Amino acid sequence: MGAWSAGISGSDTAMDLRSEYQAAFYYFDVETALKKIDAFVRSEGFDESEPEGWCDYYYSLADFMWRKGMLTDEVKNTALNMIDSEFGLALWAESGKAILNKRKKALADFREKLLSDQPPKKKIKINLYMTPIFAVGDVIALQLKTNDKYYMEKSSGFTEAYFRSCHDHWVVMRKVYDEVSYVSRIVPEVRDIWPHFQLYRKLFDQCPDMEDITQGMWVTLKDGRACAYVTEGSMRNFTRRNACVIGRSLDGIEAAQGRPFEDSIYLGTNTSYAGNGESDILKALWQE
């Protein structure tokens, strides 16, 4: 079996489909979304003759809709009939009595949930970054904030005093390309876009102009690969660091686009782990 848990969402299929449910119900009314979801699932080779995949689909769909306060009588009754008829349980019996009993318990709890009052209807939100930020070739300056960030003592290569002294200094980067990490199969407009950047090789005391930027001064790793700086496609991490576009440059950008950006720098907001953006940026500059 492809399940890793006896629970309703305890399979890769059920978890992957949740992203598609989110996209479909965000873009379409309930009736239209259900038709598109059903067509997609069947196009993937799942139907009522294939109990394992059909249970993953239908139970996860009913659960998603109940949680969002939009469960229809048709979906609820179909799921209840599947539970009451023990649809698909023969597959669980093949794994032994203990596993079968866990599945029966999960289905009994799920049945009780479906018969209970569902929560008030919730607005569907897409927790993805669907619109690119900045244009390819944009040169962006942003201000480091090291006062409240984690200092990587063992792997940084510099002292904490230096790290703290870089507070409010400026770094420069150039947008190289966008990585599309996810695209909905039902609604292709729903996608997750992460921008990638190159770092410039110098720290500035104040926000620089393009006249201060020398081409060919982008940071590279020891094996010649372009040094990558990557973050989620949100302006939040930039605006809080007073980021501004100071110009545009496409010089040599094709070579950077063709190189794999491994060992990426992530400009996250978490200050408690050793991979925060300020530490990684300064480490990359320090190693130059």
Image (cartoon, rainbow, N blue to C red):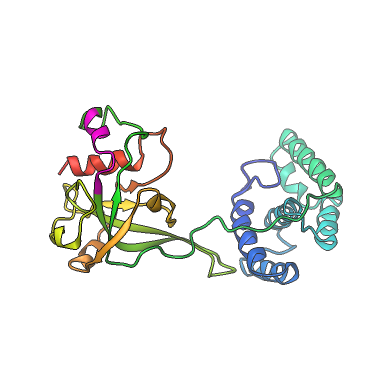
Q: Is residue 61 magenta?
A: no
Residue 78 x %, y %: 83, 59
Q: Nearer the viewer, residue 109 or 26?
A: 26
Q: Is residue 96 above or below residue 115?
A: above
Q: Nearer the viewer, residue 182 or 140?
A: 140
Q: Is residue 4 left or right of residue 266?
A: right
Q: Can you name the residue that lies furthest to the front here?
A: 206
Q: Is residue 103 above or below residue 114?
A: above
**Residue drawn at 59 percent across, 55 percent down:** 16
Q: Is residue 69 above or below residue 138?
A: above
Q: Nearer the viewer, residue 93 or 217?
A: 217
**Residue drawn at 27 percent across, 44 percent down:** 281
So how many labels did they put on this image?
A: 0
Q: Is residue 194 left or right of residue 36?
A: left
Q: Which quadrant is the C terminus positioned in? A: top left
Question: Which residues make up the magenta segment?
Answer: 161-170
In which quarter of the view is residue 213 placed?
bottom left
Q: Is residue 269 left or right of residue 31?
A: left
Residue 185 x %, y %: 56, 67
In which quarter of the view is residue 96 placed?
top right
